[in-house]
Image (spheres, rainbow, N blue to C red):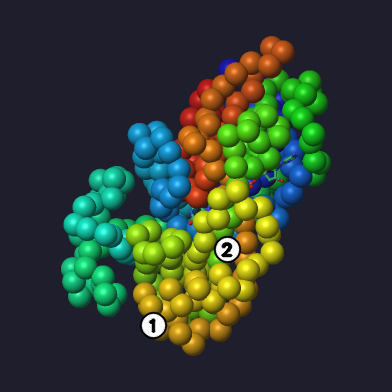
C-alpha cells in the first residue's frame, strides 16, 4: 500500500497506539487532540490488565489477549513503565471469570491467599501499566518517529476528512459529539494514590457491596479504587468517596492503613454498549472508529489498534 497521510483524532492510549502502528506501516501520521498527555483520561487509568466494563466478550477477549502479548514485549523497556504483577480477583463463588482461560498462569486461589472474610478468588498474572510513565513514553516514541501532534478542539470531523487520506476517530468520550454517537456515555471513576508500603500484589473485588474495589501496587505508589458513577461528569473529587475507598481497600490489605495519601484523581471512562472498531467511508475518505473502551482502554489498546489499522 502506498504511504498515506493519516489524521488520528485523540492522543489518549487509543489514538497513540493507532498512530504508532500506522507509522510502523509507513504512513505519515498527524494527531489532532483537544488535550495532549498528561491531560487525557488515559493518564489517570489505574491501570492493570483487566477486561472491566467492556463488551462484546468474544472480541474483547481477542483484543485483551493481543494487548497482553504486546505489553509483555515492552516489559524490558524500563521507560515504558510496564510491571508484571500477581493479581487476585475475589469472587462470589467457585466460578472462574470468563477471561481466566486467556492467561496461562490463572488458577483458583488457596484459602491462605485470601483476605479475611473471603472464600473464593482467582490468582492470575497481570500487567500493570504505569500510565504517568507509559503514555508520555508512547507519545515521545510517536514524535521521535516523525509524527506531529496538533492541539486543537474539534467541533466535527469534516475538517480532518478534508485534510487527510484517512481519519482515525480515537476521541474517547469526545466521540459522542464527533462521530456523533449518543450511545457513548461517561462512567466517572475516582481513585487514590498512596505511598507504597511494600505491596506487590494487585487485588480486585467486583463483587463487594457498592463499587468495584482495587489495590494496584506500582513501583513507588499504590492506586486504590474506586467508583463507577454512570452518567456523572463531575471531575471534582468527592471526599466521601475518598473515605469509602480507603476503608474498603484497608479491609482487603491492612498494610495500607497508614500509607500517606499522595493524590486523589478523577477520570471519565468512555463507555459504550460495545467497543466500536469499525470502518466507514465519508465523502470518499476512509473513517476508522476506535472508541468506547469503557474501563478497559489500556487492557485492549494494542489489540484494538491492530484491528483498526488492519481496516485501513
Ligand atoms: C479511574 C479510572 C481507572 C481506570 N483503570 C483502568 C485500568 O485499570 N485498566 C484499563 O485498561 N483501563 C482503565 N481505565 C479506562 C481507560 O482509562 C480508558 O478506557 C482509556 O483511557 C480510553 O482511552 P481513549 O484514548 O479512548 O480516551 P482518552 O484517554 O480520553 O483520550 C481521548 C482523546 O481525544 C481527544 N478529544 C476528545 N474530544 C475531542 C475533540 N472534540 N476535539 C479534539 N480532540 C478531542 C482528547 O483530548 C484526548 O486526547 C480507567 C479509567 C478511569 C477513569
Pick the residue in front: 207 or 23: 207
Percent coordinates x, y for residue 248 in the rendering: 43, 73
Percent coordinates x, y for residue 12 in the rendering: 63, 47
The tally of labels here is 2
Q: Is residue 237 shown above or below 198?
A: above
> Would residue 178 be found to the left or right of residue 50 on screen?
right
State the mark number for residue 283: none
> Would residue 25 be found to the left or right of residue 76 on screen?
right
In terms of secondary structure, where does tag 2 sit? strand
**Disc on the earlier residue, 1 or 2:** 2
Q: Quadrant of residue 15?
A: top right
For the residue carrying disc 1, how many other residues have a C-alpha within 10 Å: few (<14), some (14-19), or many (20+)? few
State the mark number for residue 254: 1
In terms of secondary structure, where does tag 1 sit? helix
Q: Which residue is mark 2?
A: 190
- Residue at image location 58% in from the left, 34% down from the top: 183
For the residue carrying disc 2, how many other residues have a C-alpha within 10 Å: few (<14), some (14-19), or many (20+)? many
Q: Quadrant of the N terminus?
A: top right
Q: Quadrant of the C terminus?
A: top right
Viewer can see residue 21: no
Amino acid at each position: 500500500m502506498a504511504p498515506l497521510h493519516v489524521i488520528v483524532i485523540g492522543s489518549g492510549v487509543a489514538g497513540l497506539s493507532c498512530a504508532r502502528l500506522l507509522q510502523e506501516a509507513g504512513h505519515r501520521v498527524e494527531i489532532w487532540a483537544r488535550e495532549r498527555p498528561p491531560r487525557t483520561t488515559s493518564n489517570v487509568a489505574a491501570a492493570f490488565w483487566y477486561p472491566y466494563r467492556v463488551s462484546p466478550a468474544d472480541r474483547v477477549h481477542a483484543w485483551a489477549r493481543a494487548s497482553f502479548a504486546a505489553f509483555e514485549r515492552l516489559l524490558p523497556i524500563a521507560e515504558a513503565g510496564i510491571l508484571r504483577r500477581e493479581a487476585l480477583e475475589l469472587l462470589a463463588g467457585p466460578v472462574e471469570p470468563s477471561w481466566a482461560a486467556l492467561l496461562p498462569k490463572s488458577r483458583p486461589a488457596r484459602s491462605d491467599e485470601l483476605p479475611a472474610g473471603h472464600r473464593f478468588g482467582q490468582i492470575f498474572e497481570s500487567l500493570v501499566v504505569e500510565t504517568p510513565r507509559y503514555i508520555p513514553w508512547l507519545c515521545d516514541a510517536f514524535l521521535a518517529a516523525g509524527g506531529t501532534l496538533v492541539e486543537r478542539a474539534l467541533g466535527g470531523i469534516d475538517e480532518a476528512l478534508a485534510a487527510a487520506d484517512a481519519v482515525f476517530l480515537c476521541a474517547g468520550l469526545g466521540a459522542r459529539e464527533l462521530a456523533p454517537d449518543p450511545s457513548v456515555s461517561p462512567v466517572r471513576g475516582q481513585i487514590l494514590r498512596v505511598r507504597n508500603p511494600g505491596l506487590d500484589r494487585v487485588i480486585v473485588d467486583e463483587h463487594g457491596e457498592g463499587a468495584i474495589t482495587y489495590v494496584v501496587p506500582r513501583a513507588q505508589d499504590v492506586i486504590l479504587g474506586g467508583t463507577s458513577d454512570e452518567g456523572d461528569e463531575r471531575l471534582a473529587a468527592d471526599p466521601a468517596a475518598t473515605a469509602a475507598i480507603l476503608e474498603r481497600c484497608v479491609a482487603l490489605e491492612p498494610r495500607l492503613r497508614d500509607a500517606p495519601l499522595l493524590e486523589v484523581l478523577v477520570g471519565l471512562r468512555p463507555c459504550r454498549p460495545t467497543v466500536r472498531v469499525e470502518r466507514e467511508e465519508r465523502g470518499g475518505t476512509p473513517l476508522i472508529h476506535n472508541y468506547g473502551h469503557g474501563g478497559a482502554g489500556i487492557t485492549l489498546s494494542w489489540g484494538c489498534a491492530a484491528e483498526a489499522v488492519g481496516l485501513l
